[in-house]
Image (cartoon, grey):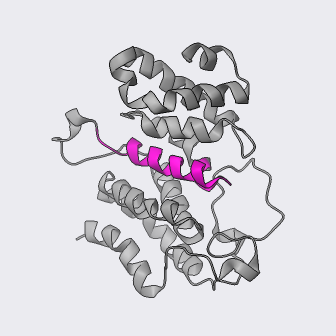
């Protein structure tokens, strides 16, 4: 399987290899050794920039990344962020799960305080914006349920000074987004594009993740009214006290 990932860049081959390894991901370190797992992680991370919405390898590759231990791998964050807005809910779910694993401290570092994920301000700000957008627009309940958990872990792993510099400039945008009515199209100027090179959709995006204004108000998504917006952001305010 590693040889297939290493030598064949065809989407279908990568998808088949990743899918075959997924059921045994929890024992790969024990059976293959850490060096082989590190090589597998390097191959998977290296393949992400070449994947798009039409790539059959996107879902299994992200699912395998989410199933493998991820320590000191936050340098790969830029390659992961575009998948938070992927058209497939399974890919978005795996991207959120992988991001959550990236934010976990190494067991040897748990006793060290304060925790600092080391993210540059620009990367931290982009991650906060994309998570907030996902909370507003996610239409799958299981994926939406992951967003506050990842948000919490991102805050816990970030020093207060970095959060202040990254989040304070965003509150105006977040409030404007949260006040968009369910049947109204979202102002694209308020949204961050995780992949600037991607082709812009010709249809408008509506609150709740729908591309159809007639069904936008019927979708289930995280309620970000004035009260629940405060609840969603409360951990950020708590860190500053």
Magenta region, residue range: 83-105
Q: Where 127 sits versus 11, above or below?
A: below
Q: Where is residue 234 in the image (x, y as percent from the top left)?
A: 33, 74
Give percent across and percent down for residue 225: 48, 85
Q: Which residue lies furthest to the left in this view?
A: 111
Indicate the position of residue 142 as horizontal and vertical percent values.
49, 61
Task: Name the residue located 75 percent from the left edge and 80 percent from the top edge.
Answer: 213
- 240 part of magenta stretch: no
- From the viewer's perspective, is 95 left or right of 165? right
Quarter of the image with the C terminus is bottom left
**Residue in front for this viewpoint, 119 or 135:** 135
Residue 99 part of the magenta segment? yes
The answer to whether one can see residue 33 in this image is: no
Indicate the quadrant where residue 182 lies: bottom right
108 sits to left or right of 151: left
Looking at the image, which residue is at 18% across and 46% down? 113
Q: Quadrant of residue 37?
A: top left
| Front residue of this view, candidates 162 and 103 | 103
């Amino acid at each position: 399987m590693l040889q297939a990932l290493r030598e064949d860049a065809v989407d279908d081959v990568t998808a088949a290899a990743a899918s075959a390894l997924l059921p045994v991901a929890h024992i790969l370190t024990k059976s293959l050794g850490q060096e082989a797992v590190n090589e597998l992680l390097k191959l998977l991370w290296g393949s992400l920039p070449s994947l798009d919405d039409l790539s059959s390898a996107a879902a299994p590759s992200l699912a395998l990344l989410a199933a493998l231990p991820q320590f000191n791998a936050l340098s790969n964050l830029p390659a992961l962020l575009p998948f938070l807005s992927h058209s497939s809910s399974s890919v978005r779910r795996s991207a959120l799960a992988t991001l959550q694993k990236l934010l976990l401290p190494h067991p040897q570092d748990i006793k060290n305080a304060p925790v600092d994920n080391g993210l540059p301000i620009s990367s931290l700000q982009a991650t906060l914006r994309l998570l907030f957008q996902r909370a507003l627009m996610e239409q799958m309940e299981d994926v939406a349920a992951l967003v506050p958990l990842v948000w919490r872990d991102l805050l816990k792993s970030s020093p207060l000074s970095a959060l202040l510099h990254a989040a304070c400039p965003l509150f105006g945008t977040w409030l404007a987004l949260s006040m968009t009515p369910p049947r109204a199209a979202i102002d694209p100027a308020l949204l961050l594009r995780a992949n600037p090179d991607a082709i812009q959709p010709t249809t408008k995006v509506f609150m709740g993740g729908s591309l159809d204004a007639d069904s936008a108000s019927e979708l289930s998504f995280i309620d970000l009214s004035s009260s629940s917006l405060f609840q969603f952001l409360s951990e950020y305010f708590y860190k500053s006290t």
